Image: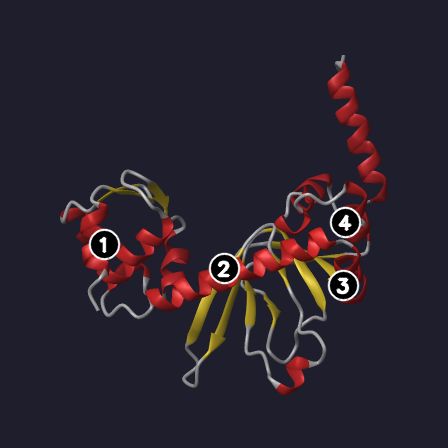
């Protein structure tokens, strides 16, 4: 027998499932409702946004979009991660970052992409579920609900700040300096633990080989700046890391 609270939850879930777009599960609804863009937004507004969306699924390593073929919809990540990057003249990946569940990717708007091409590629780094939200309707929701617009501005500001941090990290001339700067960006106190798993993706984010990252972590551990166990790094000597990170 269900108690009263369980019955209310079950009833609520049944009501939610009636309006979910085809292929969308209750887990998707909960993930979408928890996205930063919907922070503090009434449930009925979230429902209006999600009902307009189309579910898209991509398998690992599948291209989500390219500079020449970018969707005109907002993309809300429900599950999995997207690798975003550009290619330089030699075909090497540059400007790499990952976007995960709850993040919203914006489409090119007002035809800006025609005069200033966007060179971004997006690739599924694991099995991926996306909700494609038509730009027209979503922009109208942003216009009608200031809270959503404020949340979007906050997300874009955070993305810009992360991009600035990554640009600073890549100025490092050696892997130990690069990794030291990365660890300092992830935490602000001694004894904090940073999970660098999966190591391969962290290495990609830093623009170095996985083996190079592993050697750098081993070197920092031997210098008693960090402890490392099973993909988790604990900062032991923050001042020492800061001194190393200050090297050009």
Task: Classify mark 2: residues with Cα within 10 Å, few (<14), some (14-19) or many (20+).
Answer: some
Left or right? Give the position of 163 relative to 168: right
Q: Quadrant of residue 112?
A: bottom right
Q: Residue at x 57, y 61 (%)?
A: 156
- From mark 2 to mark 3, how far is it between C-alphas? 24 Å
Label 3: few (<14), some (14–19) or many (≥20) C-alpha neighbours in 10 Å: some
Q: Is residue 128 left or right of residue 192?
A: right
Tell me the SS state at disc 3. helix
Does label 4 or label 2 sit earlier along the sequence?
Answer: 4
- Which badge, 3 or 4, is on the more N-terminal residue? 4
Which residue is pictured at 72% across the width and 77% down the height?
110
Instruction: Please tell me whether mark 2 sits on a helix, a strand or a loop.
Output: strand
Q: Closer to the camera: disc 4 or disc 2?
A: 2
Tell me: residue 3, above or below residue 189: above
**Label 4 crowd (10 A; few <14 / some 14-19 / many >=20):** few
In the depicted structure, whether residue 125 falls above or below residue 39: below
Q: Residue at x 20, y 49 (%)?
A: 239
Name the residue that disc number 3 marks.
Answer: 139
Residue 217 position, x and y percent, is 24, 52
Q: Nearer the viewer, mark 1 or mark 2?
A: 1
The quadrant the N terminus occupies is top right
Q: Which mark is residue 93?
A: none
- Residue under pointer 2: 98
Q: Which mark is residue 242?
A: 1
Disc 2 or 3, which lies upstream in sequence?
A: 2
Instruction: Return the residue at label 4.
Output: 23
């Amino acid at each position: 027998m269900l108690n009263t609270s369980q019955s209310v939850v079950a009833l609520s879930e049944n009501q939610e499932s009636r309006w979910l777009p085809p292929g969308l599960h209750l887990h998707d609804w909960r993930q979408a409702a928890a996205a930063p863009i919907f922070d503090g937004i009434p449930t009925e507004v979230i429902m209006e946004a999600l009902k307009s969306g189309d579910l898209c699924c991509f398998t690992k390593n599948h291209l989500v979009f390219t500079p020449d073929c970018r969707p005109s919809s907002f993309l809300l990540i429900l599950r999995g991660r997207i690798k975003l990057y550009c290619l330089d003249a030699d075909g090497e990946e540059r400007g790499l970052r990952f976007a995960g569940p709850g993040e919203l990717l914006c489409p090119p708007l007002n035809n800006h992409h025609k005069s200033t091409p966007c060179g971004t590629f997006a690739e599924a780094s694991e099995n991926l579920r996306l909700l494609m939200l038509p730009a027209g309707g979503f922009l109208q929701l942003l216009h009608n609900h200031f809270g959503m617009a404020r949340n979007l501005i906050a997300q874009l500001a955070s993305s810009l700040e992360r991009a600035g941090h990554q640009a600073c990290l890549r100025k490092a001339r050696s892997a130990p300096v690069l990794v030291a700067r990365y660890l300092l960006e992830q935490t602000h106190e001694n004894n904090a633990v940073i999970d660098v798993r999966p190591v391969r993706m962290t290495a990609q984010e830093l623009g170095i080989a996985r083996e190079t990252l592993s050697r750098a972590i081993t070197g920092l551990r031997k210098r008693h700046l960090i402890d490392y166990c099973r993909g988790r790094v604990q900062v032991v000597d923050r001042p020492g890391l800061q001194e190393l990170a200050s090297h050009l």
